[in-house]
Image (tube, grey):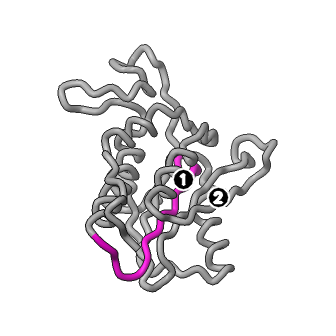
């Protein structure tokens, strides 16, 4: 159900909000909170799925994941992405702080701007515009993990397995991962 009060999200501002969060794998640092708050405001039902050991490190670290769905009908079109980023390396090598989210000459700089906080924000903004203009047939969902840049043991695969065990059906999925090694999409 769409209403005239559905907010239209600014993709640059949402990207900046996400970049400012130093969500270096496996630390979420609040990135999922920002997305959950934004998606809830768009009428999505959000739930967290955390896997791994709360006291673990490295491959055993606890990972936050978010599944958000709007609607119950089929088909369910899902966007998959990740909020975790790789370490910054030597910060003195950066022309802008890695988590400063600065815009210079029309370009947004920061860790995760491309891979892939910007992609998530763009999809959230596009969905907000579609919903502000009217309803969509079926359902829309987001599957966001905090475990893609690291060992990737407690992210997308475990979320999909948990959803399937509950009978949740994702009919189609758009993967916003911008990097690949051999063929498009081989990194997710």
Does 163 sit above or below residue 39? below
Q: Quadrant of the N terminus?
A: bottom left
Report x, y in % for residue 116. Answer: 41, 47
Does 72 sit above or below residue 125? below
Q: Disc 2 or disc 1, which is closer to the eye? A: 1
Q: Which residues are magenta?
A: 134-149
Quadrant of res 125? bottom left
Question: Which element type, helix, strand or loop, lies under badge 1?
Answer: helix
Does 95 sit above or below residue 12? above
Whether the magenta-drawn stretch holds residue 143 is answered as yes
Mark 2 in CB contact with mark 1 (< 8 angstroms): yes
Residue farthest to the left, as pictured: 105
Mark identifier at residue 48:
2
Total marks in image: 2
Q: Is residue 74 visible?
A: yes
User: Viewed as shown, does residue 54 lie left or right of 24?
Assistant: right
The crowd level at tag 2 (other Cα within 10 Å; few <14, some 14-19, many 20+) is some
Report x, y in % for residue 138. Answer: 40, 81
Report x, y in % for residue 137. Answer: 35, 82
Name the residue: 53% across, 46% down: 149
Does 141 sit above or below residue 73? above
* Residue of label 1: 36
The crowd level at tag 1 (other Cα within 10 Å; few <14, some 14-19, many 20+) is many
Query: Quick one: label 2 or label 1, which is nearer the N terminus?
Result: 1
């Amino acid at each position: 159900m769409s209403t005239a009060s559905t907010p239209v999200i600014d993709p640059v501002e949402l990207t900046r909000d996400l970049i400012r969060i130093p969500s270096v794998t496996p630390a979420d640092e609040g990135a999922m909170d920002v997305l959950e708050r934004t998606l809830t405001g768009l009428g999505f039902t959000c739930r967290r799925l955390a896997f791994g050991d709360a006291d673990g490190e490295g491959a055993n670290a606890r990972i936050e994941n978010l599944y958000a769905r709007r609607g119950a009908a089929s088909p369910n079109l899902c966007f998959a992405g990740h909020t975790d980023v790789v370490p910054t390396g030597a910060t003195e090598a950066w022309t802008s702080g890695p988590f400063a989210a600065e815009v210079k000459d029309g370009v947004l700089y920061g860790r995760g701007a491309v891979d892939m906080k910007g992609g998530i924000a763009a999809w959230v903004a596009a969905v907000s515009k579609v919903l502000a203009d009217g309803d969509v047939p079926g359902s829309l969902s987001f599957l966001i993990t905090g475990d893609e840049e690291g060992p990737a043991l407690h992210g997308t695969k475990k979320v999909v397995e948990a959803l399937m065990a509950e009978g949740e059906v994702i009919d189609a999925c758009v993967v916003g991962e911008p990097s690949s090694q051999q063929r498009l999409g081989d990194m997710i």
